[in-house]
Image (cartoon, helix red, strand yellow):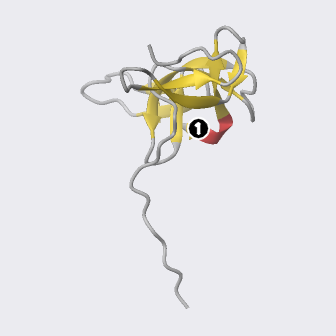
Amino acid sequence: MKMKTEKIKGRNINIKKDDMVVVITGKYKAKTGKVLRALPQKNKVVVEGVNIITKHTKPSMTNTRGGMIKKEAPIFRDKVMLYCQTCKKGVKIEHQLLEDGKKVRVCKHCKEQFDK
């Protein structure tokens, strides 16, 4: 009996590029960093200074020496929380509508807006 799998087109992950996040589990727990890329199709984010991998490269026309390159790899979105500057910790968010009809992300504790 075959199981039917559905493709997920994209997810709303509530974390965007240039957000400050804190890692809540794993090897890099309690480390904060800026989101370099958000990958909603894979439910992952790339955070600056977190999940560093070493990639071995061969010499080529663009990279004549080759060698080892250190770079950030994606981590699951479930392992990070948005970092609130006033609360100084990772926080849950809620969405609010402004008077002009714009939807913004807001800290649940101090009510500070993440979207300026």
- Amino acid marked by disc 1: Ile
How many marks on residues? 1
Which x, y percent locates residue 115?
A: 46, 18
For label 1, the SS is strand
Give the residue drawn at x 59%, y 39%.
77
Q: Name the image quarter holding the N terminus.
A: bottom right
Which x, y percent locates residue 58?
A: 39, 34
Give the residue drawn at x 68%, y 15%.
110
Res 89 quadrant in image: top right
Seen from this angle, which residue lies furthest top? Answer: 86
Residue nearest the viewer, comparing 49 with 98: 98
Which x, y percent locates residue 40?
A: 45, 43
Give the residue drawn at x 75%, y 22%.
30
Which x, y percent locates residue 80?
A: 64, 32
Q: Return the residue at label 1.
A: 75
Residue nearest the viewer, comparing 15 with 63: 15
Residue 5 visible somewhere in the drawing: yes
Q: Name the image quarter holding the C terminus.
A: top left
Whether 34 is drawn above or below 95: the answer is: above
Residue nearest the viewer, comparing 7 with 103: 103
Res 66 quadrant in image: top left
Q: Is residue 18 left or right of residue 106?
A: left
Residue 52 visible somewhere in the drawing: no
